[in-house]
Image (spheres, rainbow, N blue to C red):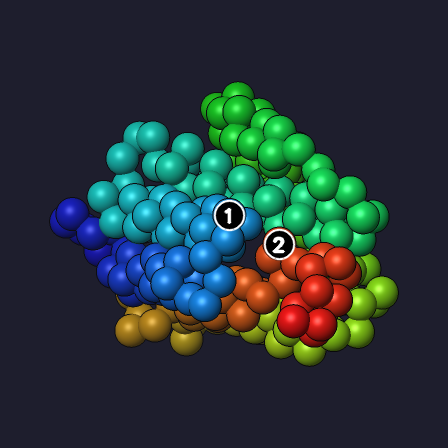
Amino acid sequence: MGGFIAQHAAAVTSLAFVVAGLAVLVGRRRDAPSITYGLLIVAVGVGSLVQHGPDPPWQGYAHDIPIATLLAYIAVDAASDRFGRRLSPVWWLVVSLLMIPTVAAGPTASTIVQAFLAAAAVGLCLERARVRPELRRTTIVAAVLVASGALLGAVGDRTPICRPGTLLPGHALWHVLAAAGLWRLEPMIGSSADTTVRRRRS
């Protein structure tokens, strides 16, 4: 489709990330990890809207850098909890800088880095849930939502039912389910065994 909006359904459903991020920001928790997490989700939605909407020459930076940064943040947060250490923000902020030359190198390089970060985030979240049973339900529900979206997106790219010209392409479904999964993951962000014990005692 032409005009200002390149891919209507994908552009509109990009707002699901903005809604999910805002839901995190206005939720019950107002601590620094939750606020940072919510802002990163909003940034992903804005970047996705830029890519699927006006699609300017710099859309790759707007789209890929927030996604990579969010994945790195989730991975670092899970690692901090799992290994009982407060990791410096540098561990995930540096990803934003490294993604600039990565995006410039082309979409293949950027996709590979994002896939690596996604694997790290998922793996560390699952490991965190393995040692902390109280987080397993949240982790499983979030993982199922994201995995379902990824599957629908992949299938949609290969079948006529979810092409860009249809009412709801597979990539648009991926946006909605991924945003829901990120919102569902919020209770885990910034949590640790120590804070959980303190909450139960209070």
Q: Quadrant of residue 88?
A: top right
Tell me whether the residue at label 2 lies in contact with that at label 1, contact meaning CB atoms closer than 8 angstroms.
yes
- Amino acid beneath label 1: Ala
How many numbered marks does the figure carry?
2
- Horizontally, is 70 left or right of 128 in the view? left
Q: Amino acid at mark 2?
A: Gly
The residue positioned 38% from the left and 37% from the top of the image is 62
Q: Is residue 189 left or right of residue 17?
A: right
Residue 6 image position (x, y, % from top left): 25, 51
Front residue (pair 65, 2)? 65
Q: Position of residue 151 (x, y in %)?
A: 58, 69
For the view shown, which residue lies furthest in the left direction? 3
Give the residue drawn at x 68%, y 44%.
76
Say if 104 sits above or below 83 in the image. above
Q: Quadrant of residue 26?
A: bottom left
Q: Nearer the viewer, residue 82 or 74?
A: 82
Q: Residues within 10 Å of mark 2 (few under 14, many from 20)?
A: some
Image point (75%, 52%), residue name = 81
Which image quadrant is residue 113 in?
top right
Q: Secondary structure at mark 2?
A: loop
| Residue 139 seen in the current view | no
Residue shown at 34% from the left, 30% from the top: 58
Q: Which residue is mark 1?
A: 32
Q: Quadrant of the C terminus?
A: bottom right
Farthest residue toward the front? 202
Comparing 15 with 197, the one in front is 197
Q: How far apart are the two marked residues, 2 and 1, measured between alpha carbons?
A: 8 Å
Q: Nearer the viewer, residue 70 or 178?
A: 70
* Mark nearer the N terminus (2 vs 1): 1
Residue 90: x and y in percent read: 62, 29
Q: Which residue is mark 2?
A: 190
